Amino acid sequence: MIISMLFIALFFSATLSAQVKQAEPERKPIPARQQPPQQPKYQQQENNAPRAVPVKPVQQQPRIVKPEKAVSNPRQENYEPKAAPVKPRAVQPAQANPVQQEPRPVKIPAKVTQEPKQLDIEPQPQAVPVKPAVQPKHDPNTQAPPKAVTVLPPVRVEPQPANHVNPVYDPRNPSWRYAHLPRRHSHVYHLPPGHRMIHFMNHNYWYCNGVFYQPYNDMYIVINGPYGIYVDMLPFGYRSFFVNNYPYFYYNGNFFDYRDNYYYVVSPPVGALVESLPNGYETIIINGETFYEVDGAQYKPVLQENGEIWYEVIKANN
């Protein structure tokens, strides 16, 4: 029975569903052209936003400010800060100072009379008329002759040569200052750089750094400067001195005299004292004394105060 009833219920439900489907009309799909255009989301939101209503400007009236009344704050008036309790502090009695208790002696200053203040102003010296000095006349019987004032002539010096050597004093070598220069009467095949020719007395000579050369065949002989030949500048390392209040210049056995803006080679003046002789001197012994001869002139060694030995001209080669 139960199975037959279930079968009948299923049959009636199937027939009902078929009738309902026949009664409903078929729905056709709406074409895409007839569908209403959908607005984008951001436009829909704009259309839904409320419209702005124009607002008329309101004329602001001047504001009247009333002076404020001083309102007393009852809380501040009635407020009284409570003082914190202060504990009593034990005060010790100060010890007596015997130095302060003793009376100090008071000095009564004596009456000082006020003197006028002196200003630190240096007195200006007054101009004193100077009288021209009167030169005393020379009296040959009582006074010595006045000494002539010597003035050193102008000096022009050549630049320092490339082969210059700082000399060192040697008491055993009279030519210690000019030992680096060529020896007197020696022969050389090549002249040093910077040499120049000097035409004098129908002869040609060569000069470089205070040394004179004379041509000989294919060589050059080292000589002393001929007397009367002149140069426009003194060699580097020259020495100057006075003989009988007359100035002379000396370098490597050559004596120079300044005349007419030039320096002339002259004979060695007697009494001249030089510190070194040229390389190539000759030694002469007379009565046990040693003398030196250079280019015909004789020199005598003289001991100086500083312990050095210099050489004095005792005979010229006129």
Image: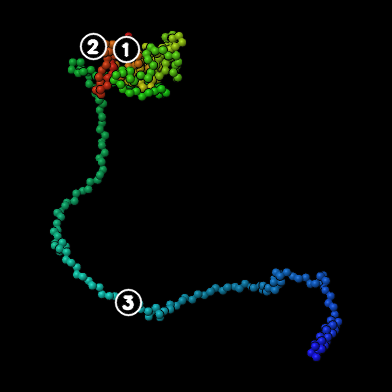
CA separation in Å, label 3 and label 2 = 124 Å
Q: How many callouts does the rendering have?
A: 3
The kind of residue on which mark 1 rests is Glu
Judge left or right: residue 64 versus residue 164: right
Pointer 3 or 2: first along the chain = 3
- For label 1, the SS is strand
Vertical placement of 103 versus 229: above or below? below
Judge left or right: residue 207 versus residue 52: left
Q: Quadrant of residue 209?
A: top left
- Return the residue at label 3: 83
Residue at the spot 22% in from the left edge and 21% down from the top edge: 136
- Return the residue at label 2: 288
Q: Residues within 10 Å of mark 1 (few under 14, many from 20)?
A: few
Residue at the spot 18% in from the left edge and 17% down from the top edge: 142
Q: Quadrant of residue 256?
A: top left
Residue farthest bottom in this picture: 1
Specify the label residue 84 is tagged with. none
CA separation in Å, label 3 and label 1 = 122 Å
Vertical placement of 276 versus 91: above or below? above
- For label 3, the SS is loop
The x, y position of residue 49, in whole percent, is 68, 73
Quarter of the picture containing the C terminus is top left
The nearer-to-camera label among 3 and 1 is 1
- For label 2, the SS is loop
The x, y position of residue 205, in whole percent, is 43, 12
- Return the residue at label 1: 282
- Verify CB contact (< 8 Å) between mark 3 and mark 1: no
The kind of residue on which mark 2 rests is Gly
